[in-house]
Image (tube, helix red, strand yellow):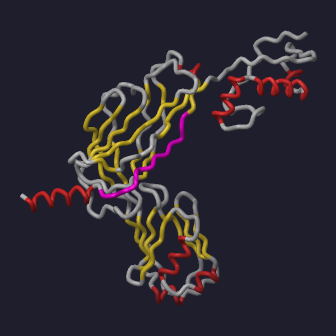
């Protein structure tokens, strides 16, 4: 019995481990309160999570939204993707030491980011490890590890497609180099259960050779919510929770990610002007008049509702908040 208890504890540690929380990112969809009136399907943003734990078969992932989701008969499955790996075994210490490039050596990924190494720097490198350090000193979408036995191994900094190695350009001395690509592998996540505001997924079998050392990501779907008549300033967020098959939390403490925000598109701001404004001439007199515009901006600076929008948007007073429409509905000139 004592030995079995130790075995269970070891299995839990292998699955979860002491890892940092997952980190999520999304491009929040900004919606207007007017546009949400009477609408029964409002889109939200997809979220990409960079995972910290080592997921295995039977682990669960639960995504929860702060508002009810549109009823979907079959929620779509997701995947956990590992990182692309590219191996250049020919870049041994001897090869690197003999390199005398006539031009810069440029590594480029499919996202367009590059690591450009000067000919002088490459010529001064004597080992694969030194060449890897030169690559890692650049702002690049891949991390390099260099050893004499394995050459240069490039691992994408994000899981799934995107930051794989695309090209290596430059003038090399020595034998031609061969790049061996190991495509991204995935752990399937199938729907286990769902509620009005959440979906729980269960991890399937882990494919052989899954790269636990690099980045591991989950990209969620942008789900529609059913909430209509949203109030100004409402934020819809998505939370992430995961656990082992034994119910032990993993990637705990992951921060919620905002997937939608609602703001009033039109506001009423009272503007006092000491001069005549011709609102019948296609509003040109006001729009093209610097003094009149200045008076309008001063009125904005005194309007508490607008100042609240300015503070929320993080802009300076007297500047227009992005996405705010201005409509001259009525003007009384004295």
Q: Residue at x 33, y 35 (%)?
A: 199
Q: Residue furthest right?
A: 275
Q: As displayed, is residue 48 above or below residue 313?
A: below
94 left or right, relative to 248: right
* Residue numbers of the magenta segment: 17-29
Q: Residue at x 58, y 64 (%)?
A: 139
Whole-percent x, y for residue 9 in the image: 19, 57
Name the quarter where the C terminus is drawn.
top right
Residue 307 higher or lower than 7, as above or below: above
Residue drawn where x is 51% and y is 64% of the image:
166
Dividing the picture into quadrants, the one containing residue 233 is top right
48 left or right of 187? right
Q: Nearer the viewer, residue 170 or 187?
A: 187
**Quarter of the image where one finds residue 62:** top left
Point out residue 262 in the picture as x, y percentages from the top left corner.
Answer: 56, 27
Q: Position of residue 229 (x, y in %)?
A: 52, 18
Residue 321 in the image: state x and y as whole percent.
Answer: 70, 32
Toward the left, the furthest residue is: 1
Residue sticking out furthest to the front: 2
């Amino acid at each position: 019995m004592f030995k079995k208890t130790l075995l269970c504890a070891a299995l839990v540690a292998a699955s979860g481990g002491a890892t940092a929380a997952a980190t999520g990112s999304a491009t929040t969809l900004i919606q207007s309160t007017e546009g949400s009136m009477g609408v029964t399907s409002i889109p939200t943003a997809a979220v990409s999570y960079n995972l910290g734990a080592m997921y295995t078969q039977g682990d669960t992932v639960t995504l929860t939204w702060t508002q009810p989701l549109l009823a979907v008969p079959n929620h779509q499955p997701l995947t956990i993707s590992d990182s692309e790996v590219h191996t250049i075994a020919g870049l041994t210490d001897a090869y690197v030491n003999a390199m005398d490039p006539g031009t810069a050596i440029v590594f480029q990924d499919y996202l367009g980011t590059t690591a450009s190494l000067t000919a002088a720097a490459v010529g001064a490198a004597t080992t694969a490890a030194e060449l890897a350090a030169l690559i890692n000193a650049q702002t690049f979408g891949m991390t390099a590890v260099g050893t004499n036995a394995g050459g240069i191994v490039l691992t994408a900094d994000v899981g799934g497609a995107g930051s794989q190695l695309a090209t290596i350009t430059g003038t090399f001395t020595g034998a031609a180099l061969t790049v061996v690509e190991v495509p991204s592998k995935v752990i399937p996540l199938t729907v286990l259960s769902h509620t009005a505001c959440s979906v729980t997924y269960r991890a399937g079998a882990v494919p052989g050779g899954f790269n636990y050392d690099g980045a591991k990501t989950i990209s969620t779907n942008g789900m529609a919510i059913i909430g209509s008549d949203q109030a100004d300033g409402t934020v819809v967020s998505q939370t992430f929770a995961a656990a082992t098959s034994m119910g032990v939390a993993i990637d705990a403490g992951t921060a919620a990610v905002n997937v939608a925000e609602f703001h009033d598109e039109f506001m009423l701001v009272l503007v006092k002007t000491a001069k005549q404004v011709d609102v019948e001439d296609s509003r040109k007199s006001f729009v093209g008049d610097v003094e009149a515009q200045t008076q309008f901006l001063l009125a904005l600076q005194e309007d508490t509702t607008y100042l609240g929008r300015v503070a929320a948007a993080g802009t300076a007073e007297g500047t227009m908040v992005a996405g705010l429409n201005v409509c001259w509905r009525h003007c009384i000139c004295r």
